[in-house]
Amino acid sequence: MTHTLLPACGGTEQPFTVNGKRWLYCWCPELGKHAYLNLDTDVAVWNRQFHPAWSPEYEHIPESESPRTPSHPETEEVDFYF
């Protein structure tokens, strides 16, 4: 199945290179999801935990198989008022 991928950020997202691979962060209006498009192979990576620079190990792992991380990690509340 083919989906339309548009550059993210309203079409202003620019391609970038990590370890010799060119990437573009894209938006798919049909699915309502973001993906990273490898511009050298024309393969989109839909795993939300993937990032070419920080989490490249998720490139070939389906999202259903990747470990879950909490969407809002619990953090200690800090009081900035004295």
Image: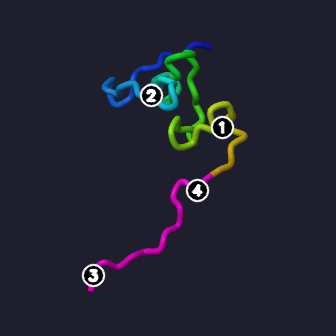
Residue closest to the eye, 78 or 59: 59
Query: What's the amino acid at mark 3?
Result: Tyr
Residue 78 shows up from this direction: yes
Range covered by the magenta-colored residues: 69-82
Q: Position of residue 79 (x, y in %)?
A: 35, 79
* Residue lying farthest to the right in this orientation: 65
Query: What's the amino acid at mark 4?
Result: Pro
Q: CA distance from mark 4 to mark 3?
A: 28 Å
Disc 1 element: helix
Which tag, 4 or 3, sits closer to the chain's start? 4
Neighbour class for label 1 at 10 Å: few (<14), some, many (≥20)? some
Which tag, 2 or 3, sits closer to the chain's start? 2
Q: CA distance from mark 2 to mark 3?
A: 43 Å
| Rendered image: mark on residue 70 | 4
* Residue lying farthest to the top in this orientation: 2
Q: Position of residue 13 (x, y in %)?
A: 35, 28
Query: What's the amino acid at mark 2?
Result: Thr
Q: CA distance from mark 3 to mark 1?
A: 41 Å
The residue carrying mark 3 is: 81
Q: Quadrant of the C terminus?
A: bottom left
* 7 displayed left or right of 36: left
Which tag, 3 or 1, sits closer to the chain's start? 1
- Residue found at x 52% / y 35%: 52
- Residue found at x 62% / y 14%: 1
